Image (cartoon, helix red, strand yellow):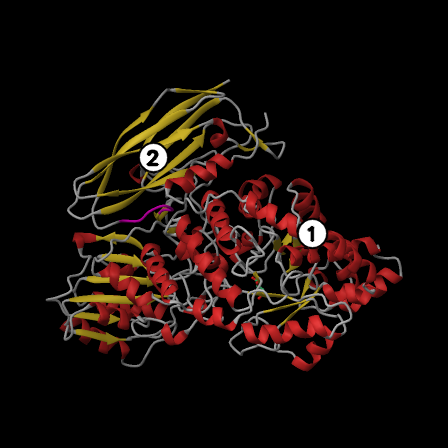
Amino acid sequence: MTLAPSRRALLAGALGVGAVAVVAPPRALAQAAEAAIQRHAARIEDLIARMTIQEKAGQLSLFGDPFRFRPENVNPLDGQGDPARIAAMIRRGECGSLFNGIGAEAGRTIQRIAMEETRLGIPMLFAADIIHGLKTVFPVPLAEAASWDVDLAFRTAQAAGREGAASGVHQTYAPMVDVGRDQRWGRVVEGAGEDVYLNQLFATARTRGFQGNDLSRPDSMLATPKHFAAYGAAEAGLDYNTTDMSEGRLRTTYLPPFKAAFDAGALSVMSGFNDLNGVPASGSEWLLSDILRGEWGFKGFVVSDYTSEQELIAHGYAADGRDAARIALLAGVDVSMMSGLYNAHIPELVESGDLPLRVVDRAVRRFLSVKAALGLFDDPYRGMDPAVEARVVGSQAHYDLSREAGRKSMVLLKNEGNLLPLPKTGKSIAVIGPFGQDTEVFGPWTIWGDKTRAVSLEAGLRAALPAGTALTFVKGAEAESAISGGIEAAVAAARRADVVVLAIGESQTMSAEAQSRADIVVPAPQQALAEAVAAVGKPVVVLLRTGRALELSGAVKDAQAILVTWFLGSESGNAIADVLFGDHAPSGRLPVSFPHLSGQQPYHYDHKATGRPMDDDQANREEYRAQFRETPHSALYPFGHGLGYAPVTYSGLTLSAPTLAWDGRVTVSATVTNTGSRPVEETAQLYIRDKVARLTRPVRELKAFQKVTLAPGASQTVQFTLDRALLSYVGPEMHLTLEPGEFDVWIAPHAQGGLGGSLRLTR
Ligand code: BGC
């Protein structure tokens, strides 16, 4: 039995959080793009007929922008290039696009070279890594995923897109939709975490936010889901490492977020660095042509990741640069980033007959078609208006949104004795740790964030507290090294204070690309600091800055309160103060499981049962079960977990019927009650388990969620509708399938608890 892929499942979740804007039909976008492409089809064909083979190769060659390069553009290792050289290349038609330069006025100058000083006057495309904001920086994508608020993700992507577009950028290399199930992998910070469904929702929201309803609008930016595909499954969490998996796992876990982004209208995609099952992704015709275009009907263009087509050589898949260019083009990499291999080899490859001209023409046609969809053939200077740039970039509305996003992205892991929120008066606070006063709050992947407007924790706390409040700051340790006398000073400050705020975790450079960690712990010098400070005996609040889930231990794990603050962007300090002092209650939920121990990685809540499942009740720990000697096979803080400032209970799970007919529907509901004295926003989560199937299914899978706001003492019923589409899975035939039988169902506050029932699907 084959089912059409369920849009309803996506909509159910999106609607659950009131995401009206996000669920506007992507059809309008596709139609606008199609109309623009059709309008320019004859011109594109005419250009293809008139372009020399070198001009075609050049059109497909992308380089770092040397005109607007700044040293902090860390990634274009050699993108700084020589502006005169690149200008000459543009004039000769040897460069069709540039990346990682911003600025409307300078963009016009470069575009003018392409329009007025080249033989054919084909507009350039400008791309950039605008991952979670341009000048205004929003929380890192992993943090924002912790909001479980797709409407928020839509709005921050829209704001980032508007800042980018107003700065003369047409394409962003985002969203990253790689599912991150191994917290050693540093790029977990760039995605939406370990769950497939959450990744699909955020892929959809971000794509729509960047692109809007019409790509040709001057405030719209082309989205580029990356890194296609399965890049996040690197062995040992080691960035760039091999990925090797069954087709079932690929289609169940790693492909759906990409599909969601394309369904939302993304018209470009970046091919990954990784080797997948023996074929590097950037040389894989199966991925880039058979699946992407054959199965999914993708109409946009594929850009390689930074020299990933050249890396086919290092992978041992291509003999040399010529071979690499040939393989990549044949596989379906249309545009080559940075390597220069297309310029160097396409003419000769075609001349010698080793590469059919139609393959080159195909890539040029795809690329020019997206340029047409972006409106570049109508107005090559679209979006390049310095007056608009000055108004839009870094606007107050964007900073307000950043603060809202920051508040909603924090996750309260524990709060013993209701230590939080802290009172604003009457207590002296010692803020201890490397992250009390610094402004490294943007996270690891921000090139143009306005540092002058980054709000440190100190600035945020001081702004929130009455003047004269006793507030001391002691660093105590650097992120990864000790400070001489640091611990002594910290202990002295803790002694003098009523409460200690430990601002610790990972520095900005410890996550993101190439920043894999073998041991995902709080670095030893900070752990030592935490131990010494805790020994003083004052109440301790941990503010955990991190780009991944961590193993927590000792004084950090035992602190009375732990608030995960990730990297919250421009308004970090203000957002933290909003939550710390209770002006806003925390509402985030973990998008990644916090393990008991590092060695559990890769860990994800939706693992298989195994033939020897561990007993959930650790008191019954038996031998010869799927568990470690040192730890149960579970999370310390599971996926989905997060507290507010009031306790919430779940009761009365009810199924509208014990059986679900093949074409029927069953509703499952439960009552959620705020039993505390403060308002709370609860995220009720629907999980299922397919008990018997032709392929074994995970112990739980998230299928939907709903946010409910509850006043003190208030109750509300949450209700989810189940139909068979929601229960389907990728079966042995490699497409969605389903068999009648028994399903477990939970409405739960997180992946390791909740109220369970069961349901029989009948045909
Ligand atoms: C990264 C991509 C990024 C590209 C361009 C690569 O190193 O893997 O995510 O978009 O560089 O900066």
Front position in the image: 439 or 279: 439
Q: Which SS type dominates the magenta stretch?
A: loop
Res. 624 visible in picture: no
The image quadrant that residue 525 belongs to is: bottom left
Mark 2 lies on a secondary structure that is: strand
Q: Nearer the viewer, mark 1 or mark 2?
A: 1
Give residue 442's position: percent from left, percent from top. 41, 67
Front position in the image: 418 or 453: 453
Instruction: Tell me the distance, in whole angstroms, between the alpha carbons under discs 1 and 2.
Output: 51 Å
The magenta region covers 638-643
Please name the amino acid that badge 1 sits on: Arg
Front position in the image: 486 or 231: 231
Is 216 rendered above or below residue 622?
A: below
- Residue at 83% over, 65% down: 52
**Residue corresponding to mark 2:** 747
**Residue corresponding to mark 1:** 39
- Residue at 59% over, 72% down: 76
Give residue 381's position: percent from left, percent from top. 61, 67
- Marks counted in the figure total 2
Res. 521 visible in picture: yes
Is 177 situated left or right of 350 in this image? Answer: left
Is 237 rendered above or below residue 573?
A: above
Mark 1 C-beta to ligand 1 under 8 Å: no
The image quadrant that residue 547 belongs to is: bottom left
- Residue at 85% over, 65% down: 348
Who comes first in sequence, dot 1 or dot 2?
A: 1
Give residue 192's position: percent from left, percent from top. 45, 52
